[in-house]
Amino acid sequence: MRHIETVDEMTRLAAQLRGQGKSIGLVPTMGYLHEGHLALAEAARGENDVVIMSIFVNPAQFGPGEDFETYPRDLERDAALAEEAGVDILFHPEPADMYPTDGGIRILPGPQADVLCGASRPGHFDGVLKVITKLFHIASPDRAYFGEKDAQQLALIETFVRDFNFPVEIRRIPTVREEDGLAKSSRNVCLDAEERKAAPAIRQALAEGEQIFRKNGERERALQEVRRRLGEIPGAALDYAELLEYPSLQPATKESREVIIAAAVRFGSVRLIDNVLIPVKEAAACSK
Ligand code: AMP
C-alpha cells in the first residue's frame, strides 16, 4: 500500500491511473478505522482496479466547540487495517495542504441540510460538500463509497452529485454494528463503561419505531415511541429523533418511497447518531 501525503502527488497519480484505463474507487474517511470503514473499502476492492482511501479529519465540517481537536487519530493502526482490507493508496493530507487559502466561496446545501444533524450543526454539511468536492477532483474516482450510518450525509452527496453532474457513482453501504447492535463509530471509544452499556438502546429504540411503522404506517406513534425510549436511556440526552422521507429529508407523505427514522443522542460530550432506512413499498401504507 502506498502512502500519499500531498494533494499534488495524489492528483497526479490519479490522473496517471485513469490514463492507464484503471477504474478508481474512493473511500473518504476521517480515520480511526473500524469495521464500518473497512466494509466500504472491501466493497470498493471488489468493484475497482485501484482503491484509494482518504484519511482526513476535515476541519471545515467541525463547528466551534465541537470535537475537532479531540477526534481520535491513529494513522499507524489505520494504515495496517486499510492495507489488510485491500486499500492500494492511503491519502492522508495535512489541513494546510487541503486548505492553503480560503477565497470565501461556500457550497450551500438546500433544505436537506437544515434538519437532523444539520439543525444543530450549522455549516457542517457545507464543510462536508467542500471536502467531498475537493476529494473527487483530487482522486477522480469512478465510484465513491459512503455508509448509511451517516444517512443525511449520503442523501446530500447523492443529490449534489446528481444535480451537479459529478462523473462519479455513489455507492451506499449498510451500517455495520457491534454485536449488541450499537452502530460502529470512531466516537464509541470515547464512551465510559456505563455509557457504552447503555448505548445499544439507541438501536433498539429505532428498531421499535421501525416495527410500529411497518405494521400499520403510524408515523406519529412510531416517532413518539422512539423518542420515549431514547428519553429513558440512562446518562443520555436526546438531541433529535425524526421520521422523514428519504432522501429529500422532508416530511414523509403517502407517496414517499423510502423513509428514515434518525436519531442523535449525547452521552456527555460524545454525540452518537443512528438511523433506520425503511423502503415503504415493503411497509404498510403510509397513511397517518
Ligand atoms: P467517518 O470516518 O466517520 O467520516 O466515516 C467515513 C465513512 O464511513 C462514511 O461514509 C461513513 O458513513 C462510513 N461509516 C462510518 N461508520 C460506519 C458504520 N458503522 N457502518 C458503515 N459505514 C460507516
Image (cartoon, grey):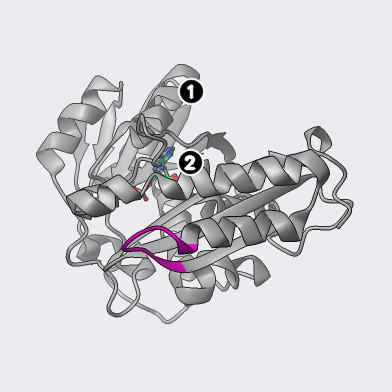
Toward the viewer: 153 or 9? 153
* Residue 31: % across, % down: 26, 45
Q: Nearer the viewer, residue 149 or 262?
A: 262
Q: Position of residue 276 (x, y in %)?
A: 59, 44
Q: Which residue is mark 1?
A: 21
Range of residues picked out in magenta:
231-238
| Residue at x-position 29% and y-position 72% | 66
Instruction: Confirm or reject: label 2 Cβ below 8 Å from ligand 1.
Output: yes
Residue 68 left/right relative to 165: left
Ligand 1 falls in which quarter? Answer: top left
Q: Are marks 1 and 2 in contact (CB under 8 Å)?
A: no
Q: Label 1, label 2: how many angstroms apart (C-alpha)?
A: 27 Å
User: Which mark is first along the chain, 2 or 1?
Assistant: 1
Instruction: Tell me if residue 208 comes above or below residue 272 in the rendering.
Output: above
* Residue under numbered circle 2: 147
Residue 234 figure quarter: bottom left
Residue sitting nearer the eye, 268 or 184: 268
Quadrant location, the C terminus: bottom right
